[in-house]
């Protein structure tokens, strides 16, 4: 299951980290997003950030979740770009 780590930021809440999980279910891909620490470990007490999103490809399902983060936070940075 692909996992994507993002650092997000806004003035009200400061920096936070979210993990997007993407998995294949029957004939489509599903993405979910949860709060994690900066190492990617899930924070158990936190609720999911958004409902599940679906896509024909893994990239499409992930992109839909990233769109939610981008509409909620001032800055969204993939871990691959350095955090």
Image (cartoon, rainbow, N blue to C red):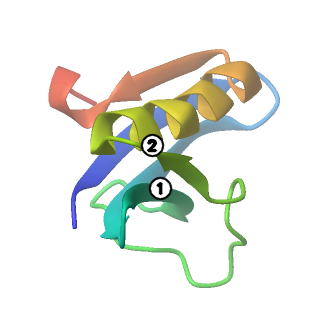
12 left or right, relative to 63: right
Residue 61 found in image quarter: top left
Few, some or many residues within 10 Å of mark 2 (<14, 14–19, 20+): many
The one nearer the camera, 79 or 24, is 24
Q: Which residue is mark 1?
A: 31
Residue 48 found in image quarter: bottom right
Q: Which residue is mark 2?
A: 61
Q: CA distance from mark 2 to mark 1?
A: 5 Å
**Where's residue 8, x and y in %?**
54, 32
82 left or right, relative to 47: left
On residue 74, the disc is none
Q: Earlier in the sequence, mark 2 or mark 1?
A: 1
Residue positioned 39% across, 56% down in the render: 29
**Where's residue 44, x and y in %?**
57, 84
The one nearer the camera, 56 or 68, is 56
Spot the residue most to the front. 27
């Amino acid at each position: 299951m692909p996992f994507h780590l993002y650092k997000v930021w806004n003035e009200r809440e400061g920096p936070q980290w979210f993990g997007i999980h993407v998995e294949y279910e029957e004939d489509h891909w599903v993405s979910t997003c949860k709060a994690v620490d900066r190492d990617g470990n899930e924070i158990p007490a936190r609720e999911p950030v958004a409902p599940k999103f679906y896509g024909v490809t893994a990239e499409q399902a992930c992109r839909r979740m990233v769109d939610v983060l981008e509409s909620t936070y001032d800055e969204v940075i993939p871990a691959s770009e350095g955090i």
